[in-house]
Image: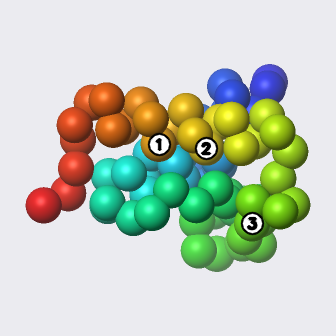
Amino acid sequence: MSQSNDRRHGGPYDRGGADSYYRRPCVPHYYVGGTGSSELIPEDRMTPNEIEAYMTGFKDNEASGNFKY
């Protein structure tokens, strides 16, 4: 499975969508395992595909207008 199709909790797509939902800045990252309970991978350690997956998650949520208020 490519990273762009990996929608698991803590993965790049999930983190992008969550950052948008909570109105946090667009800063690519993801977790190796569960969010907050495993190693955080920052942008400088991400592959281009992982960054693309994060950006897609962020942009998809922005387009949906689904934000926490």
**Left-right relation of 19 to 11:** left
Mark 1, residue position? 58
Q: Earlier in the sequence, mark 2 or mark 3?
A: 3
Q: In this view, does 44 lie above or below 6?
A: below
Mark 2, residue position? 54
Tell me if mark 3 has few (under 14), some (14-19) or many (20+) residues whose alpha carbon lies within 10 angstroms of its own. Answer: few
Can residue 30 be seen from the camera position used here?
yes
Tell me if mark 2 has few (under 14), some (14-19) or many (20+) residues whose alpha carbon lies within 10 angstroms of its own. Answer: many
Measuring from the top left, give residue 46's x and y in whole percent: 82, 53
- CA–CA distance in space, label 1 to label 2: 6 Å
Measuring from the top left, give residue 34's x and y in whole percent: 63, 62
Q: Is residue 47 above or below residue 31?
A: above
Q: In this view, does 52 lie above or below 9?
A: above
Q: Is residue 65 above or below residue 43?
A: above
Q: In which quarter of the image is the N terminus?
A: top right
Mark 3, residue position? 42
Q: Which residue is drawn at 22% across and 50% down?
A: 67
Q: Which residue is drawn at 27% across and 30% down?
A: 64
**What is the quadrant of residue 32 in the picture?**
bottom right
Tell me if mark 1 has few (under 14), some (14-19) or many (20+) residues whose alpha carbon lies within 10 angstroms of its own. Answer: many
Marks 1 and 2 in Cβ contact (< 8 Å) = yes
SS class, disc 3: strand
Q: Residue at x 86, y 61 (%)?
A: 45
Q: Nearer the viewer, residue 33 or 65?
A: 65
- CA–CA distance in space, label 3 to label 1: 16 Å
Measuring from the top left, give residue 9's x and y in whole percent: 56, 50
**Left-right relation of 2 to 10:** right
Kind of residue indicated by mark 3: Pro
Measuring from the top left, give residue 2's x and y in whole percent: 79, 26
Kind of residue indicated by mark 2: Tyr
